[in-house]
Amino acid sequence: MSFAPTPLILASASPRRREILSLLGLPFEVAPASSEPAVDPLLPLGEAVCAVARGKAAEVTARFSGRMVLGADTVVSVDGLALGKPRDEADARRMLRLLQGRTHTVFTGVWLFGPGYPAEGSGFADGAKVTFFPLTPREIDEYVATGEPMDKAGAYGIQGAGLRNIRGIEGDFYTVMGLPGGRLWRFLHNHPEG
């Protein structure tokens, strides 16, 4: 299917995903899903984030029949643990202690429903590896005090103050930010990923 110029519906309240769609020059409207499906611990994480993205998009599709709807979900994985958004500051500190001085994987799943797609929709997952510098307890406390970690998978934002914790990244920066823009563009326009 070739992407149509009709604005797609973004089934997410994420300002980062809105920013990425704007950078791509894709017309869109925002209609967040009212609930967030849980990550299925029995599935490989790439499949699990796609299932969550699909659930969000399916809910919103029911409100916007005949429109293209995009759902997305991001999860951080370390030691086989899936880290979503922290519940509170103590949980954010716990997550940052797990990540500090180590490499972890960030998975973002994308799912689309709409004209030209199969009834069950279509999508993909993308993964990127991120390595943190070692962090002191004080550095963790100072970062948590900024409030930035509270609405982000793994309790950090690579595009914000969290960048000071990042030693390196292998893969797509935008996957870590919450939406693999290059892959999404090619997916929407039927270009091979090569």
Image (cartoon, grey):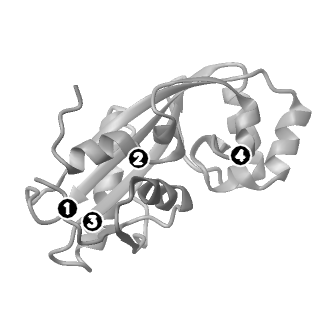
Comparing labels 2 and 1, the label whose residue is closer to the camera: 1
Which of the marked residues, 2 or 1, is nearer the chain's N terminus?
2
Element assignment for label 2: loop
- Badge 4: residue crowd in 10 Å (few <14, some 14–19, many ≥20): some
- The residue depicted at 17 percent of the width and 78 percent of the height is 65
User: Cα distance, mark 1 to mark 4?
Assistant: 34 Å
Marks 1 and 3 sit apart, C-alpha to C-alpha, by 5 Å
Q: Which residue is mark 4?
A: 91
Q: Secondary structure at mark 1?
A: strand
Q: Which residue is mark 2?
A: 39
Q: What's the amino acid at mark 2?
A: Val
Decide: marks 1, 4 in contact (CB < 8 A)?
no
Query: Circle 2: is it few (<14), some (14-19), or many (20+) Cα within 10 Å?
Result: many
- Rendered view: 52 above or below 67: above
Q: Which mark's residue is nearer the viewer, 3 or 4? A: 3
Marks 4 and 3: in contact by CB < 8 Å?
Answer: no
The residue at which mark 3 appears reads as: 69
Q: Residue under circle 1?
A: 113
Q: Is residue 194 left or right of residue 144?
A: left
Q: Is there CB contact under 8 Å for labels 1 and 3? A: yes
